Each structure stands twice: as structure tokens, then as C-alpha cells.
Amino acid sequence: MSDHVRQTEPFRWEGIEVRPYRQEGTHFSGITRQVLFEGGDGLACELRYFEIAPGGWSSLERHHHAHAVMVVRGRGRVLIGDRIVDAGMHDLVRVPSLTWHQFQAGADAPLGFLCMVDCERDVPERPDAAVVAELRRDPAIAAFVRV
Amino acid sequence: MSDHVRQTEPFRWEGIEVRPYRQEGTHFSGITRQVLFEGGDGLACELRYFEIAPGGWSSLERHHHAHAVMVVRGRGRVLIGDRIVDAGMHDLVRVPSLTWHQFQAGADAPLGFLCMVDCERDVPERPDAAVVAELRRDPAIAAFVRV
């Protein structure tokens, strides 16, 4: 990438492709991904911008690598382990290693966030039926999670 | 830090200290530093928020590690090697390895930006008189740099 990349319209940048979040699936909805900074050449992390449309959600998953997230548009809710937090503008969310997590936009607002991750990272694990059943023992989480 | 840190007022976060940018010196002015995400535990980088007051500037320096910067408040100008770029809201700036750089706020606007860096990084090098003289051979850079 160039050393200077302009925002051309809100949350769109020159030369940065708006990509699908993941390959096909029904375990996520209404979410795009843009890689703002690739790693390498003196950077051990990447910085991505994700945007979840109103009513959408990211995959419920966990992995060894951590996420460092900052909300920069709209608001939403995030499952981090055994709790659900309301995340508003510029709030910071850290998803620790091996912690089940899911991001959801509000019903009437998008959720746009920056996410910093290590370049070298493991593949996310998705929950099996037993894990989902265990998570759903908490009524608040049962009402929240989409799988 | 907690897994969820709220923004309490614009560009201030609960429990995150507003620190001096550097120790005493005359090679920078009007700049604060907040560490939003520390590294470790699955993160090889840190994410910091710097804010330069109107008329202020960061240290002119270079180092082996890279910077990945996103403007999130106000606007300013950035020296990256041999060019000066105008950086506005949400613009991205990558400072490559061993590249002289300096951030300056506008005369009447602050410049607030996120900066991602490797946790393990080298100490910045400041320019000696010969380097400054070389940089100043370009009239635009001569008018820009503060040392």
C-alpha cells in the first residue's frame, strides 16, 4: 500500500477492497472486512475494519490469538466469554485468548470497528453442539448467540 | 486492563492514563499519549492514541520498527521520508522502517491519531546536524520540520 491512504467516503479508503468477512456460511450475517494495514516490514500485527449491518452478527468462535477492538461507527453488543457488553463509540474491547466471542450490531445501527490481530495466528474454532448447549445455560447468552 | 473499556468523554477512556508523550525536551510540543491496548497475551503489537494540540508537533525521528497510523480527530500534516502529506479524518499513514517522520497538528485544529507498533521495537534515532541540513535542502521540508 501507499504510505498515505485517504478516506474517500465514510469508512471507505482509496485502493482498499471491501471484502466478504468469511466464505459462505450461515454462522454470520451482514458483515464486511477491509484490511487497513497489512503486517510485515516492521509490523507484527494487522489492522482491519469490520462493519456489521443493522441486525447482523459475526461468527461465534474462539482461538489462541487475541483481538484488540475499537468501535468507530455505530454501536452493538459483544459476547466475551460469559458476559455480554454494550459497546458504543470509541469503546475498547479486548477478546482474550481462547474466549468464545461474537459481535452483533444493534437492530437499527451498524457496528463498525477496528480490530488489531497478530499476523501469525491460529484458525478460529467454532463451537460444537455441546459448547453451544453449555453457553446457552445462561438465559442472557441463550437469547444472544447466533450459531 | 478490563475486557471492556468505555470512552468516558471524547478521546478519554476509563482507567487509561493521559501520559506525557516523551520525557522533557524541546524537540516536541503539545502532545499526549494514551496506551489503549498493551501487547502480550496473544498480541504482538500495542495500540496507542496520540493527540497533538493545535500548533504542536511530534519528535522528528526514525527507527527500524514501522508505524501504522489512523487519524481519528482533527487534521494535520506528516513528514514521511521526503514528502509531506495532509492527513484528514480516518486517513491512514504508514511510516516505513528507517524513514524520517514528524507529525504536526494544524494551526487551529488538533491532530488525534491511533498508532499501532510492535511491542518489541528499537529506540528512535534523532537526527544530527548533518541529517537536518540534508532534509532542509528541500524548501518545503525546511519550512516544515521542527527540531
Image (cartoon, coloured by chain):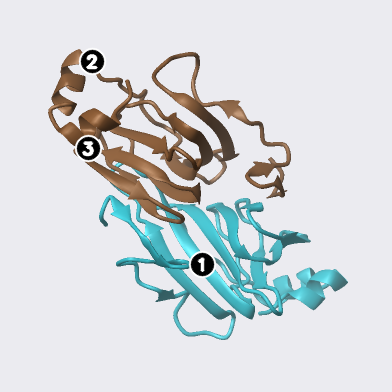
Chain colours: A cyan, B brown
**Chain where mark 1 sits:** A
Q: Position of residue B26 (x, y in %)?
A: 42, 15
Residue ID at (80%, 75%): A142
**Chain where mark 2 sits:** B
Q: CA distance from mark 1 to mark 3?
A: 31 Å
Name the residue tied to disc 2.
Answer: B128
State yes or no: discs 2 and 3 in contact (Cβ < 8 Å): no
Circle 3 Cα neighbour tier, 10 Å, few/some/many (<14 / 14–19 / ≥20): some
Horizontal relation, residue B85 to residue A90: left or right: left
- Quadrant where the N terminus of chain A sits is bottom left
- Of all residues, the one furthest to the front in this rendering is B108
Horizontal relation, residue A55 to residue B57: left or right: right
Q: CA distance from mark 2 to mark 1?
A: 42 Å
Q: Closer to the camera, A81 or B114?
A: B114
Q: CA distance from mark 2 to mark 3?
A: 16 Å
Name the residue tied to disc 1.
Answer: A50
Mark whose residue sits in front, 2 or 1: 2
Q: Closer to the camera, A103 or A51?
A: A51
| Camera sees residue B64 | no
Residue ID at (66%, 47%): B10
Q: Which mark is residue B81?
A: 3
Q: Amino acid at mark 2?
A: Asp
**Chain where mark 3 sits:** B
Q: Position of residue A71 (x, y in %)?
A: 60, 58
- Of all residues, the one furthest to the right in this rendering is A139
Q: Is residue A143 above or below residue A95?
A: below
Q: Amino acid at mark 3?
A: Gly
| Camera sees residue B99 | yes
- Quadrant where the C terminus of chain A sits is bottom right
Residue ID at (35%, 42%): B77
